[in-house]
Image (cartoon, grey):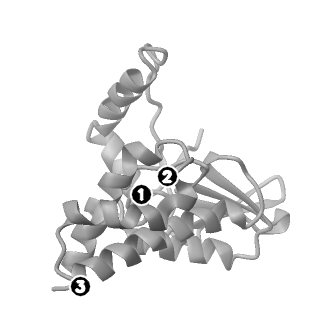
Amino acid sequence: MKIYAHPRMIERVAQGASEQWLEVMRDFTKGATEGTRVVGPNAPVEDQTDIEIGGVTFRILHDGKAHTDTDIMILLPQKSVIFLGDNAGHGRMLRMNDGSFRGNLRALERALASGAKVFVPGHGRSGGPEAATEYRDYLQAVYDGVKALFEEDLSDFEMKPKLLPKLARWKEWVDFDELVGSHVSLAYLEVEADAF
């Protein structure tokens, strides 16, 4: 049976990263996933790969580093549906530790320009374009806010209190309080790297 994934995902599973992911899930679910085993992907796909199943085209979209450098999106052009993967959460914040704000923004812009009418985020409710635009707007607000404060020579730890009022629109999202600080710090590192 073919299990599709980006080549880097296949490589990481082969190198044992899946055991680390299982451990994270065991901790996150307080043991509810105990006994789960990984059945790794075995069929590499790149950007613009088309897979035909039952007369339906599944088009792979990958823009490089977004939520991670392995997350793909899947467009079903005939159905006007796009699966965003963890490039978007709807009503829920997602970790960005292995990602890029600018890359994630590019991926979501591409999804929005895909012609899809139904957007399925990696976490949260499916819907229309708002399932992508809400998270895109959050990432843009964090990145732009951090960039502006970086230009004022503020350190990352000084930015969060100044940015919170601008991010109030998302404060009720799941994990906002838990992740907003790390999002500011990670955006700071990206803005700083872009400045050099």
For the residue labelled by badge 1, is the local secondary structure a helix, a strand or a loop? loop
Disc 3 + disc 2, Cβ < 8 Å: no
Q: Position of residue 124 (x, y in %)?
A: 64, 45
Disc number placed over residue 70 in the picture, else none: 1
Disc number placed over residue 9 in the picture, else none: none
Q: Which of 67 and 61 is in front in this view?
A: 67
Lower position in the chain sequence, tag 1 or tag 2:
2
Q: In this view, does 92 lie above or below 70?
A: above
Task: Identify the residue position indicated by label 3 in the image.
Answer: 151
Q: Quadrant of residue 65?
A: bottom left
Is 109 situated left or right of 10 in this image? right
Q: Distance between the residues labelled 1 and 2?
A: 8 Å
Name the amino acid, label 2: Ala
Q: How far apart are marks 1 and 3 (CA)?
A: 31 Å
Is 47 situated left or right of 158 in this image? right
Residue found 30% across the figure and 53% down from its top: 182
Local crowd at mark 1 within 10 Å, few (<14), some, or many (≥20)? Answer: many
Task: Identify the residue position indicated by label 2 in the image.
Answer: 5
Q: Distance between the residues labelled 3 and 2?
A: 39 Å
Name the amino acid, label 3: Glu
Q: Where is residue 165 in the image (x, y as percent from the top left)?
A: 45, 64
Q: Where is residue 4 in the image (x, y as percent from the top left)?
A: 54, 50
Is 82 situated left or right of 42 in this image? right
For the residue labelled by badge 2, is the local secondary structure a helix, a strand or a loop? strand
